[in-house]
Image (cartoon, helix red, strand yellow):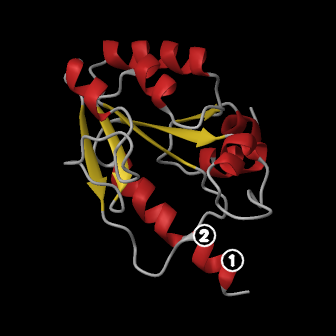
Amino acid sequence: MSRLSFVKAKVISLQQAAQMVELHRLKNHKIVFTNGCFDLLHLGHITYLAQAASLGDKLIVGLNNDASVRKLEKGENRPLNPEVARAIVLASLGFVDHVVVFSEETPLNTILTLKPDIIIKGGDYDEEISDPEDKRYIVGKNQAASWGGKVQTIPLVEGYSTTSLISKR
């Protein structure tokens, strides 16, 4: 198998991810989940994802598809990179085990299917907020508690965001 084929094989469907999670759990692996658009992969993303991966044994990244990125109002002409390219770039990172593209506005369905041990979000989210209408609310927080899962935030790397990088042009 070529290296590119190996990377592409890490981009899997939700059903495949659910099967992989079952196999990982048989080995007592702790499953970590995070999600995002990851439009222009930058130092902030790499730092965040590496820290997320260090909190468990397997890191699954939920990736917004192109239509859901547009619904998030990230800005005109976003995403800059199509979902296939964004998925392959994420999958090329050694500490990312699986990438699952989702089409909904939030990753709740993906979270409910995978039931990760830890849901990770950036420091612009707040573990204490329980109102799903608040933009800082961590989707899946309330549901994760029902299966013994937890949520955790990771501080953002100052000065790195896709929006700020685009505005520097």
| Vertical order, 115 against 126 (above or below) | above
| Residue 111 horizontal/vertical position (percent) | 43, 27
Nearer-the-camera pick, 100 or 78: 78
| Vertical order, 127 against 157 (above or below) | above
Badge 2: residue crowd in 10 Å (few <14, some 14–19, many ≥20)? some
Report which quarter residue 115 is drawn in: top left
Q: Amino acid at mark 1?
A: Ile
Query: Which residue is disc 1 drawn over?
Result: 166
| Residue 53 horizontal/vertical position (percent) | 37, 47
Q: Amino acid at mark 2?
A: Thr
Report which quarter residue 57 is drawn in: top left
> SS at mark 2?
helix
| Residue 144 horizontal/vertical position (percent) | 28, 26
| Residue 29 horizontal/vertical position (percent) | 30, 26
Badge 1: residue crowd in 10 Å (few <14, some 14–19, many ≥20)? few
Q: Residue at x 77, y 42 (%)?
A: 84
The quadrant in which the C terminus is found is bottom right
Residue 162 is tagged as 2
> SS at mark 1?
helix
Mark 2 vs 1: CB contact within 8 A: yes
Report which quarter residue 146 is drawn in: top left
The quadrant in which the N terminus is found is top right
Q: Find the distance from the CA under tag 2 to the CA under tag 1.
A: 6 Å
Nearer-the-camera pick, 81 or 19: 81
